[in-house]
């Protein structure tokens, strides 16, 4: 009886050790966020859109603190005319970086294309304020031009 118990304990230790070894080696097999991002760019160049979306989603999951993958994913959704998905991704970016004026411009573009120019104008104004705050005059000028296109001229 003691031998069976000892064999079971040794077997359990062996199995736990094997599992721990597999878990330790698993991250080495996992692709990095940068690798997944590059993979997505390759898919885009090959016009393999679903694969690019999947790679960007994986890159964002691997490194949620990095916004490049999220931003590229939002741009891709916008290109696919999936404006609501692009807006959701932009909102995720803003949870990490509320002072990114480019994200507000991207969201503004989505709202404009959705037929909501008032919301788009509001977001462009936020981006303008952030560009000014960051002393980015080129970005500010671009945002002003976008706002002019969104705001109908009064006669």
Image: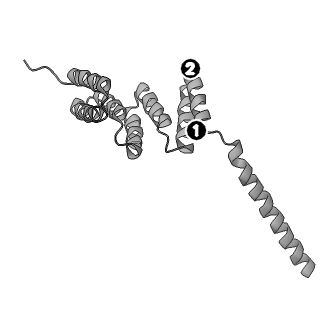
Q: Nearer the viewer, residue 42 or 125?
A: 125
Residue 151 lies left or right of residue 75; in this view the side is left
Q: Position of residue 100 (x, y in %)?
A: 36, 37
For disc 1, the marked residue is 33
Which one is in front in this view, the residue at disc 2 or the one at disc 1? 1
Residue 4 lies left or right of residue 57; in this view the side is right
Task: Note whether 10 is above or below 95 in the view shown.
Answer: below
Label 1's element? helix
Residue lying at 23% horizontally and 31% vertically, measured from the top left: 121
Residue at the far left in the pictured view: 155
Residue at the far top in the pictured view: 155
Label 2's element? helix
Badge 2 or badge 1: first in the primary sequence: 1
**Quadrant of the rendering where the C terminus is positioned:** top left
The chosen color scheme is: one colour
Residue 45, numbered circle: 2
Residue lying at 58% horizontally and 35% vertically, measured from the top left: 34
Residue lying at 41% horizontally and 45% vertically, measured from the top left: 96
Viewer can see residue 108: yes
Q: How crowded is mark 1: few (under 14 residues within 10 Å), some or many (20 or more)?
A: many
The quadrant in which residue 103 appears is: top left
Q: Distance between the residues labelled 2 and 1?
A: 18 Å
Residue lying at 42% horizontally and 25% vertically, measured from the top left: 79
**Quadrant of the rendering where the N terminus is positioned:** bottom right
Residue 9 lies left or right of residue 50; in this view the side is right
Q: Nearer the viewer, residue 66 or 151?
A: 66
Viewer can see residue 1: no
Residue 51, numbered circle: none
Q: Where is residue 99 in the image (x, y as percent from the top left)?
A: 34, 40
Q: Position of residue 125 (x, y in %)?
A: 23, 33
Q: How crowded is mark 2: few (under 14 residues within 10 Å), some or many (20 or more)?
A: few
């Amino acid at each position: 009886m003691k031998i069976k118990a000892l064999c079971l304990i040794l077997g359990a230790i062996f199995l736990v050790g094997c599992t721990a070894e597999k878990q330790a080696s698993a991250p080495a097999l996992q692709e990095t966020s940068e690798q997944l991002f590059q993979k997505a760019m390759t898919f885009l160049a090959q016009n393999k859109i679903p694969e690019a979306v999947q790679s960007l989603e994986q890159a964002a999951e691997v490194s949620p603190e990095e916004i490049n993958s999220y931003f590229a994913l939002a741009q891709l959704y916008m290109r696919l005319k999936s404006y609501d998905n692009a807006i959701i991704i932009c909102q995720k970016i803003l949870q990490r970086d509320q002072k990114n004026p480019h994200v507000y411009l991207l969201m503004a573009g989505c709202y404009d294309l959705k037929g909501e120019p008032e919301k788009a104008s509001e977001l462009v104004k936020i981006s303008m304020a952030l560009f000014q705050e960051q002393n980015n005059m080129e970005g500010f000028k671009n945002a002003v031009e976008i706002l002019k296109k969104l705001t109908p001229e009064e006669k």
